[in-house]
Structure formats: C-alpha cells, structure tokens
Image (cartoon, rainbow, N blue to C red):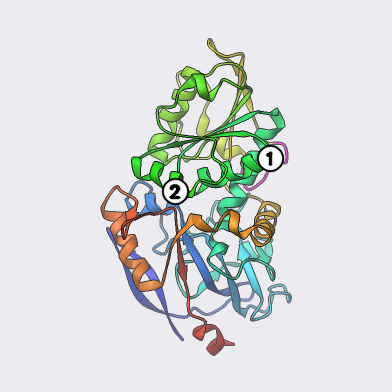
Amino acid sequence: MIYRALVRTGTRVVVATREAPAVGDGELLIAPENAGLCGTDIQILRGLRAERASVIGHEGVGRVLARGARADARFAPGARVLVNPTHPTNAGFLLGHNVDGLLQEMVLIPESAVSDGLVLLAPHAPATELATLIEPLAAAHYALSILQEFKPRTLLAIGDGTIGHLAVRCAHRAGLRTILVHHTEAGLRFSGAHALGIDVSCIGPFDPRIAFADGPTAVLIATPRDQTLSRLDEVLRTAIGDVVIDVVGGLPAGAASRYLPGLDLTALRASNCAGRPLRPNIETRALRRSGRVHVTGHRGVSNDHLRWAAEELVAHPDHYRNLVTHVVDLHDAARIMTHLAQCQERVVDGRRLIKLAVRFPSSHIEEAS
C-alpha cells in the first residue's frame, strides 16, 4: 500500500508518498484519525531544535491497521489507540522527534514502545479534532498536580500557546486566580475574544504587584526553548513571597540561572520524565526578594495523565474546543507548516493559530482492514 506523509525538507513541508512498512513481530502499524501540531513542532520546523524525524507530530488518536505476532492481542486491527510519545527510560523513543510521528497516514510504532506500555487503548477518546488536545491537556494537568501540592492561590502562566491556555482553564476551574502572559498583541486579542478562565491577561513583562499580590503563587513557564531561561529569570528577579515554578518549556543543555547558582535546570527538568518519579524532584532555594522559591520541571506525561485528559475532553468538550483554531487536510497542513517554518508569526489565514489539527481520511483504514 502507498500512503501519504507530511515530510520536512529544509524550510518546506511537502505531501510525499511512501510505501507501507512491513510490521515486525512486536510492532504496531497505526492510522491516525486526527493529529496535531504543537509549539515544539513549530520550533523544529524553524530549525530551533535539531531532531532526526522527517515526519513530526506526537498528538492525536488513531486506529490499529496491523499487529505484529508478538504484540498484545488487545491491539486488534480497528482498535482505537493513543500513543504516549515520551518513553520514561528509553531515550531512543521520542515520537515525532527521533521516531517518525503522527503527521502521516500510517505510523509504525516500534516494539520497545508497544511492549513497554506506551500504546493505550482509547475506545472512548474524542473522535474529532479534540483528540489533538489530549497530550497537551495531560501536560497541563501534570503541571498543575505538581504546583497544587504547594496550595497556591494564583496561577501565573507565561506563554500563550496551547499549554498556557489549557493550564489557566484547568486552574480557574480549580478555584485559582489566573494570569496569562502573552507574547504578542495577536495572542492578547485571541484571549480577549475567546477567554475562558483568564482573570488577568497581559503582554510581558508582567506586573509583579499583580502577579504576586495574592500569594502563594504558582508559575507555569510554557515558552519556546529560546525564551524559557529569560522568562524564568524575570520571575526569580521579581518574585514576592513564596513561589513554586514548573518549567514546562524546553531548555538548552546545562541551562542555569544566576538567581539559582549551581542548579542545572536542564537536568532537573529531565529528571521528571513521563510521570516518573511519582513525587517529582523539586529544588527549594531562598531568594532575596522572596521567602522561598520551589523550582521543578518535567518532560512528557504518564499514561494516567493521558487517560484523564481524554476523559476530560469527552466530558467537557466546549470548555476546550475553541483552542483548536485550524482544522485542515494534508495539503492545507503542508501549506500552513511551510508558512510557519519560514516566518516568526503564528497568524495563519487571518487567525491566530493555537492548535492546528490535521484530519486524515478513513479510506486507507478500510482498505487495509
């Protein structure tokens, strides 16, 4: 069989045809139904992250097309599944980074990911473009579960991409005052027109008298890798009272802050991976302007986080639906991804892009099965 994939070629993305791979004994071949493009993917397209996969994408739900002989019998052809993109112990599997991702009509999932439980049956996951929010909502939920251990009264979310928006919506429902710090006027206008759960919207730098006025304050830093450290330093420089910080945004190797001498932030973030350990590693320091600051970070999510997010989206779809701003087919996706690769803005077809969802036809699923 021949299938189509969104393939990166320099600063362009093209719809290319590929031949369906042979399925090894412990492998699964999956056909995505809906797959999303995230902020990390956009950084890859722009060359800000060097990743091996020619096909990116790690958000979405699909159906099993074929199962290897040694793969779990529950994964019969036609079963709906989602894939946890981050292996907690094997750096060789990071879907859409070093293994070709979901932005193609067929995806081969290697035996290590299948046998180690990273493929989840998802019969009740959203069957629409909302499926592209499962993984980022799981990441926001993971972050809030860490931050809420410190019983904050305010969530300060820095970054107006998908994670930032999802985090403030979840935090508001949990009774926290919420502040969302945007990168651009376009992002601020989007929030003004589509606000759910935002008490205060602003463009950075934020006003510390507002951010830390009703402490303790939880801070979620969900920024592109090239902005994370400067935004963290801004928080550390202006913090008032007790503060807990979760660094979700990426960091360069060996990243350190002059306000936290001797702390390797990149290593701290990497030490909490895919929900492990159950009690995340957190560093506590005293700051001149603040009582104490608790700093942590994490990569990926656990299977339980993914299950929670899928159930949440089914139960409360209207609370999240307007974050999927662009729903397209493969050819429009190639055009939009090329545009994003070649410019620094996230306004596409006259609208602010938060989440791009790619819909896949079902004909190849039916033919294969």
- Return the x and y of residue 354 as percentages of the image width and height: 44, 53
Residue that sits furthest to the bottom in the current view: 367
SS assignment at label 2? helix
Q: Depth check: give the residue in front, 269 or 320.
A: 320
Q: Main secondary structure of the magenta part?
A: loop
Task: Using the image, tell me which numbered label, if any, was put on residue 88.
Answer: none
Residue bearing the label numbered 2? 193
- Return the x and y of residue 123 as percentages of the image width and height: 69, 71
Residue that sits furthest to the top in the current view: 288
- Answer whether residue 76 is visible to the viewer in this image: yes
Position above or below: 236 against 137: above
- Return the x and y of residue 49 as percentages of the image width and height: 38, 48
Position above or below: 220 against 321: above
Residue 174 inside the magenta-drawn segment:
no
Q: Quadrant of residue 45?
A: bottom left
- Return the x and y of residue 47 as percentages of the image width and height: 32, 50
Q: CA distance from mark 1 to mark 2?
A: 22 Å
The residue shown at (69%, 75%) is 75
- Answer whether residue 260 is visible to the viewer in this image: no
Q: Depth check: give the residue in front, 151 or 202.
A: 202
Residue bearing the label numbered 1? 174
Identity, as a three-letter code, of the amino acid under mark 2: Ala
Highlighted range, magenta? 273-279
Q: Depth check: give the residue in front, 56 or 139.
A: 139
Q: Quadrant of residue 317?
A: bottom right
Give the number of the mark in front: 1 or 2: 2
Tell me if label 1 and label 2 are in contact, CB under 8 Å: no
